[in-house]
C-alpha cells in the first residue's frame, strides 16, 4: 500500500505537562459492552490502558503502528481558522481523525480543499462535526467507535442530575470559601427520590442512564424514534411519549441523549422550555446545538429551569464570553464525559481496529459506520438523518 497521511487532531496536553504518573495503577478490564457487543479487537496496541491518549503527546497510541505500516502521522491541536495547522495539513491528508471533545470541524468547504481525503474517523461517538452530506457526495467513509464511551457519558449524566438537584457545586464552593453556610447550601437542595425523570432518546447512553436511575426510586419517562421492547419498558417501568414536547410537561428532570441532526437541532427552544414544569432540571451531554443557547439562559433567569448542566457546547472550545459560563444555576463542564482515561483506552483501540481494516481493505464493523459508499450506513443509517445542521 502507498504511504498514507493520517492527520490526527487531539486536545492539548495538560498545562503542567504530559503526566508521568497516574492516580490509579490500572483500569478495570471489561468482557464486553452491555447487550453483548464486543470491545475493540485490533491485532495489538502500543499503549498502556489508563494512560492519557487523547492529548497530543498521547497520539492515541498510533505513532509506532502507523510508522511500522509505512504511513505518516501528523498530530496537532491547532484546528480552527484558515491559518491553523489542521487547514495546512488537510490539503494532502488521506485520513482525518478527530475527537468530539476537541472537534476538527470538517465542513463542506474544508472537504472541498482535501481532495485525497477518504476516511474521517471519530475517536469517540458523534460525527456531527463532519458535514455528512458533503462526505456522502465525496464518497468519504465516516466511522466512529460506537459504544466506546456510552457508559462513561451515562455516569456523567447521573452525576450531573444529582449535582443539580442536590445543589452540590454551590455547596462545595462554600467549603472552598471557608464557610459553613448550611442554609445558603440547602435553599436550593432537594432529593431526587420521587421525581419524574425523562430521557430524550433511549439509545446506548439514554438507556444506560435510565437503568442507572431506576434504583433512585424515580418515575422514568422516555421518548425515541423507535420504541423499546415491551419487556424492557416493563422491567424499568418506563412511560413512553411520542416526542419530547409531550414528555417534558410530565418531568422534573430531563436528560438529552439524542444525536445532533436536523431533527434535533434547537429542539430545546423557548417554546419547549415553556412546556416544561417550572423549576425543571435539564442535563445535556449530547450536543450543545440541541439547545438554543440564549433560550437556556432565559429559562434559567426566569426560573422555568432550576438548573442546567452538560458538557457540550457550540463551538468547542467556546469563546470566553459564552453565556453558559456565567449563567445562574449551571453545572457545566468542558466536553469531558466521554474521554475519561477508561474511555480513551477503548476508543484508541477502536481507532486502531478501524485503521487496520482500512489498510487491509477489510470491512469496518457495521456498528462503527456512519457514512459509507456515498450514503448513511450502519449506525449512521439508524441514528442520523440526511441533511445538514448549521455550523
Ligand atoms: P445511539 O445511536 O445508541 O442512540 C441515539 C438514540 O437517539 C437512538 O435511539 C435514536 O433513535 C435516538 N434519536 C435520534 N433522533 C431522535 C429524535 N429526533 N428524537 C428522539 N430520539 C432520537 O447513540 P449513543 O447513545 O451512543 O449517543 C447519543 C449521542 O450522545 C451521540 O450522538 C453524541 O452526540 C452524544 N455523545 C456525547 C458524548 C460526550 O462525551 N458528551 C460521548 C458520546 C456520545 P433510533 O435509533 O430509535 O432511531
Image (tube, rainbow, N blue to C red):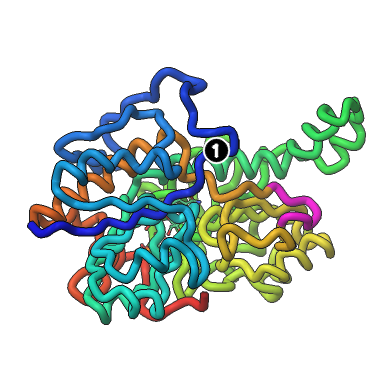
| Image quadrant assignment for residue 96 | bottom left
Residue 6 screen position, x and y as percent: 27, 56
Question: Is 347 within the magenta?
Answer: no
Quadrant where the N terminus is found in the figure: bottom left
Label 1 sits on residue: 14
| Image quadrant assignment for residue 114 | bottom left
Secondary structure predominantly adopted by residues drawn in magenta: loop
Q: Residue at the spot x=20%, y=44% of the render?
A: 67
Q: Label 1: how many residues lie within 10 Å, few (<14), some (14-19) or many (20+)?
A: few
Determine whether, in the image, residue 203 is placed left or right of residue 46.
right
Vertical side of 221 occupied by 127: above or below:
below
Along the viewing direction, whichever of 168 and 1 lies nearer the viewer:
1
Determine whether, in the image, residue 112 is placed left or right of residue 52.
left
Residue 257 screen position, x and y as percent: 49, 56
Q: Residue at the spot x=38%, y=47% of the render?
A: 232
Ligand 1 - quadrant of the structure image: bottom left
Q: Residue at the spot x=41%, y=59% of the render?
A: 126
Report the magenta residues as a range.
325-331
Residue 8 screen position, x and y as percent: 35, 54
- Asked if residue 375 shows in the view, the reply is yes
Residue 5 screen position, x and y as percent: 24, 58
Amino acid at each position: 500500500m502507498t504511504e498514507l497521511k493520517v492527520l490526527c487532531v487531539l486536545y492539548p496536553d495538560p498545562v503542567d505537562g504530559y503526566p508521568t504518573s497516574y492516580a490509579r495503577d490500572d483500569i478495570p478490564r471489561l468482557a464486553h459492552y452491555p447487550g453483548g457487543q464486543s470491545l475493540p479487537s485490533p491485532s495489538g496496541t502500543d499503549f498502556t490502558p489508563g494512560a492519557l491518549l487523547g492529548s497530543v503527546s498521547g497520539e492515541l497510541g498510533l505513532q509506532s503502528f502507523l510508522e511500522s505500516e509505512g504511513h505518516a502521522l501528523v498530530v496537532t491541536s491547532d484546528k480552527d481558522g484558515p491559518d491553523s495547522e489542521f487547514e495546512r495539513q488537510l490539503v494532502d491528508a488521506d485520513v482525518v481523525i478527530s475527537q468530539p471533545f476537541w472537534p476538527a470541524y470538517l465542513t463542506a468547504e474544508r472537504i472541498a480543499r482535501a481532495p485525497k481525503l477518504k476516511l474521517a474517523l471519530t475517536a469517540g461517538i458523534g460525527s456531527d462535526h463532519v458535514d455528512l452530506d458533503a462526505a456522502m457526495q465525496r464518497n468519504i467513509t465516516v466511522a466512529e467507535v460506537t459504544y466506546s464511551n456510552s457508559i462513561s457519558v451515562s455516569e456523567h449524566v447521573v452525576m450531573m442530575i444529582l449535582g443539580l438537584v442536590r445543589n452540590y457545586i454551590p455547596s462545595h464552593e462554600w467549603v472552598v470559601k471557608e464557610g459553613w453556610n448550611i442554609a445558603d447550601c440547602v435553599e436550593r437542595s432537594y432529593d431526587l427520590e420521587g421525581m419524574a425523570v425523562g430521557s430524550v432518546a433511549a439509545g446506548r447512553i439514554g438507556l444506560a442512564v435510565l437503568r442507572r436511575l431506576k434504583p433512585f426510586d424515580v418515575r422514568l419517562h422516555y421518548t425515541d424514534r423507535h420504541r423499546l421492547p415491551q419487556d424492557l419498558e416493563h422491567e424499568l417501568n418506563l412511560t413512553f411519549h411520542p416526542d419530547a414536547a409531550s414528555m417534558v410537561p410530565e418531568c422534573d428532570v430531563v436528560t438529552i441523549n439524542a444525536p445532533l441532526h436536523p431533527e434535533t437541532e434547537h429542539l430545546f427552544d423557548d417554546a419547549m422550555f415553556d412546556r416544561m414544569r417550572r423549576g425543571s432540571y435539564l442535563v445535556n451531554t449530547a450536543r450543545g446545538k440541541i439547545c438554543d443557547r440564549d433560550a437556556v439562559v432565559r429559562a434559567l433567569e426566569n426560573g422555568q429551569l432550576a438548573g442546567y448542566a452538560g458538557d457540550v457546547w457550540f463551538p468547542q472550545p467556546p469563546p470566553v464570553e459564552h453565556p453558559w459560563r456565567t449563567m445562574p444555576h449551571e453545572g457545566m463542564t468542558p466536553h469531558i464525559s466521554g474521554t475519561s482515561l477508561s474511555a480513551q483506552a477503548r476508543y484508541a483501540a477502536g481507532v486502531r481496529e478501524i485503521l487496520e481494516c482500512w489498510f487491509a481493505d477489510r470491512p469496518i464493523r457495521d456498528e462503527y459506520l456512519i457514512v459509507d459508499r456515498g450514503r448513511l450506513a450502519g449506525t449512521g443509517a439508524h441514528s442520523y438523518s440526511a441533511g445538514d445542521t448549521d455550523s
